[in-house]
Amino acid sequence: MGAEEQVLTQSLRTHVEQLAGEIGERNISRPQALQAAASYIEGQWEQQGYAVERLAYEVSAEPFTVPDPRRCGILTR
């Protein structure tokens, strides 16, 4: 494995450990975990130079917001 692949592998491992390990299960029954995951992703995108906008929505009358990749320039569709 080359140096670039090693960096990518470590980066992916770090993200998975943060989202799956530290933050854990995310669903409407755990809104704090949903917010923590959204904040983590938003922070990562900002570090990469994206201007992050959030998408607001409701599930079972509970408001949520998540980073919207379409409005950040990450996805062009």
Image (spheres, rainbow, N blue to C red):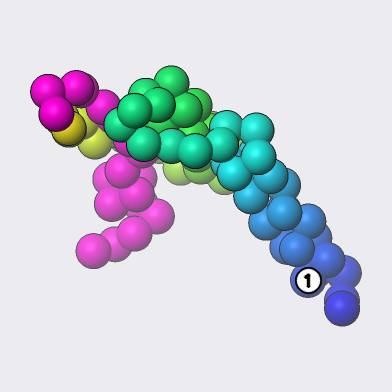
Nearest to the observer: residue 13 or residue 52: 13
Q: Say whether residue 14 is left or right of residue 25.
A: right
Residue 2 makes an appearance in the image: yes
Nearest to the observer: residue 66 or residue 30: 30
Q: Quadrant of the N terminus?
A: bottom right
Residue at image point 46% right, 42% down: 50
Residue holding disc 1: 5
User: Residue 31 lies in what quarter of the image?
Assistant: top left
Residue at image point 26% right, 27% down: 64
- Magenta residues span 60-77
Residue at image point 87% right, 76% down: 2
Q: Say whether residue 58 is left or right of residue 1.
A: left
Nearest to the observer: residue 46 or residue 41: 41
Q: Secondary structure at mark 1?
A: helix
Residue 14 at x, y percent in the picture? 72, 47
Residue 21 at x, y percent in the picture? 65, 40
Which amino acid does the dot numbered 1 rest on?
Answer: Glu
Q: Quadrant of the C terminus?
A: bottom left
Query: Compared to 74, does 49 lie above or below?
Result: above
Residue 46 makes an appearance in the image: no
73 falls in the magenta region: yes
52 falls in the magenta region: no
Q: Say whether residue 77 is left or right of residue 18.
A: left
Query: Compared to 76, does 55 lie above or below?
Result: above
**Neighbour tally class for label 1: few under 14, some 14-19, many 20 plus, Cα within 10 Å:** few
Residue 23 at x, y percent in the picture? 57, 32
